[in-house]
Image (cartoon, rainbow, N blue to C red):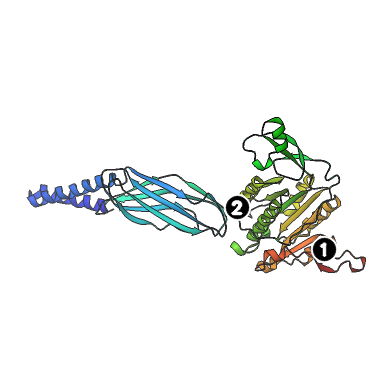
């Protein structure tokens, strides 16, 4: 806009110069034209030969951790760069503050931002936008430099010291075995060392006998399958942000999965948000990464109800299966599906996020009563209460025939 005004004034001065032949108007017209040309050339080269380097403390983090990112802008030109403005594109909750700076020939500037990972999700940092212009502000040029970098923030987890699920009885345990890369009490044989086998697996008597490094192979005892099913149907969620049932459910799911994997026990995960996510029960760090990546980006925007999910995946849950269902739904339809699974031999536990404490109007009493009547171990979680304590105390029905129907704390 400013450039157009200067060009217009130069044109007016030229018209007056041609009209009366006065040198002053000719000089003014030439001066304004040179100013516009000089400003355009200045702006044209203001962001030329700039480079950007980005460094991040990590590509993965967990809610509650602190991270940092560092950005360096380099001037590869022999000319100074003046009046530059830096804008770092990012969708992180912590905003990047624009910076105005200058760069000498061959010089560089570095900025660093420290931030706390407040919200789970997949976030992007970059590319970098550098804006240059002339001293009079007639023109502006924007250059997009660098690449887009990703930061995945895992959900928060809590330590579950007293959390127990009903075990599924698996006959033949200790007889059927399968190979594993974990060190277990069950050594099945030896084989020749292959990098990167751990040195603590070396079997020294066999090594001495054969003259080659030999390592032990291990097997796992058969184990029942444990599944965590997270209800991500959108219309049953209550509350917003960190105080909503969505975030509570994700935190509980992540905590239970971590609890089992830390104990070297197989566990699977299932949810139906916008797209179905299914991770079969496995052990180890790779399973932890897969499940946590899914939970980091999980959103309660699904249209499939919990009852429909359980009915559709019925074939996966049978004898020797333990199922933990996490939901804020008070519908009795999914309770009927739970009862059907119990008749098939599955062991069930339910984490019920009481919607009334999250600002909802639904009453969970009927659902809780139906679950307890079926002897389903039920954990009640309320907003503001400790998740660790809530998952350490389950609502159960006494096994005594004289006290059926009475609530107990287990």
Residue at (68% x, 59% y) in the render: 236
Query: Which residue lies at the image location 61% right of the left edge and 58% below the top edge?
Result: 156
Q: Quadrant of the C terminus?
A: bottom right
Tell me the crowding category of disc 1: few under 14, some 14 to 19, or many 20 or more residues within 10 angstroms, Cα based: many
Q: Secondary structure at mark 1?
A: helix
Earlier in the chain: of badge 1 and badge 2, it is 2
Q: Which residue matches tag 2?
A: 296
Q: Residue furthest front?
A: 208
Foreground residue among 128 and 165: 165
- In the depicted structure, whether residue 244 falls above or below residue 291: below
Pick the residue in front: 281 or 245: 281
Q: Residue at x 56, y 60 (%)?
A: 64
Residue 107 seen in render: yes
Residue occupying the far right of the picture: 402
Q: Is residue 41 above or below residue 240?
A: above
Q: Is 27 left, or right, of 60 in this rendering?
A: left
The residue located at (30%, 45%) in the rendering is 106
Q: Of residues 59 and 246, which is closer to you in this image?
A: 59
Q: Position of residue 289 (x, y in %)?
A: 62, 48
Q: Which mark is residue 409?
A: none
What kind of element bears circle 2?
Answer: helix
Q: CA distance from mark 1 to mark 2?
A: 32 Å
Q: Is residue 118 left or right of residue 342?
A: left
Q: According to the image, label 1 marks what residue?
A: 372
The percent coordinates of residue 27 (x first, y second) are 11, 49
Q: Is residue 240 visible to the viewer in this orientation of the structure?
A: no
In this picture, residue 55 sits left or right of residue 83: right
């Amino acid at each position: 806009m400013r450039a157009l005004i200067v060009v217009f004034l130069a044109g007016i001065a030229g018209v007056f110069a041609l009209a009366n032949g006065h040198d002053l108007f000719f000089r003014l017209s030439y001066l304004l034209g040179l100013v516009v040309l000089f400003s355009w050339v200045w702006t044209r080269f203001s962001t030329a030969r700039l480079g950007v380097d980005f460094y991040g403390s990590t590509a993965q983090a967990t809610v509650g951790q602190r991270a940092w990112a560092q950005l360096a802008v380099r001037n590869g030109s022999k000319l100074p760069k003046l009046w530059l403005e830096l804008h770092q594109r990012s969708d992180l909750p912590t905003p990047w503050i624009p910076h105005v700076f200058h760069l000498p020939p061959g010089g560089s500037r570095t900025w660093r931002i420290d931030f706390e990972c407040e919200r789970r999700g997949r976030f992007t940092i970059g590319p970098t936008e550098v804006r240059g212009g002339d001293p009079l502000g007639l023109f502006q040029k924007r250059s997009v430099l660098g690449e887009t970098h990703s930061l995945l923030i895992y959900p928060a987890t809590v330590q579950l010291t007293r959390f127990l699920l009903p075990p599924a009885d698996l006959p033949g345990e200790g007889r059927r075995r399968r190979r594993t890369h974990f060190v277990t009490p069950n050594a099945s044989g030896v084989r020749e060392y292959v990098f990167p086998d751990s040195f603590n697996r070396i079997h020294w008597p066999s090594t001495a006998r054969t003259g080659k490094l030999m390592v032990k192979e291990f097997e796992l005892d058969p184990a029942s399958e444990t599944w965590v099913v997270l209800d991500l149907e959108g219309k049953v969620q209550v509350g917003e942000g960190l105080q909503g049932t969505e975030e509570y459910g994700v935190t509980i799911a992540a905590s239970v999965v971590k609890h089992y994997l830390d104990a070297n026990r197989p566990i699977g995960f299932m949810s139906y948000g916008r797209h179905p996510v299914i991770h079969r029960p496995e052990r180890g760090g790779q399973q932890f990464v897969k499940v946590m990546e899914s939970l980091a980006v999980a959103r309660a925007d699904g249209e499939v109800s919990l009852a429909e999910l359980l009915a559709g995946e019925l074939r996966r849950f049978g004898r020797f299966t333990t199922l933990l269902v996490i939901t804020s739904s008070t519908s009795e339809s999914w309770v009927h599906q739970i009862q059907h699974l119990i008749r098939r031999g599955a062991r069930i536990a339910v984490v019920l996020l009481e919607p009334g404490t999250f600002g909802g109007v639904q009453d969970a009493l009927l659902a809780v009563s139906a679950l307890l009547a079926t002897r389903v171990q039920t954990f009640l979680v309320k907003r503001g209460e400790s998740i660790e304590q809530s998952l350490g105390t389950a609502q159960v029905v006494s096994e005594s025939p004289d006290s059926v129907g009475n609530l107990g704390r287990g």
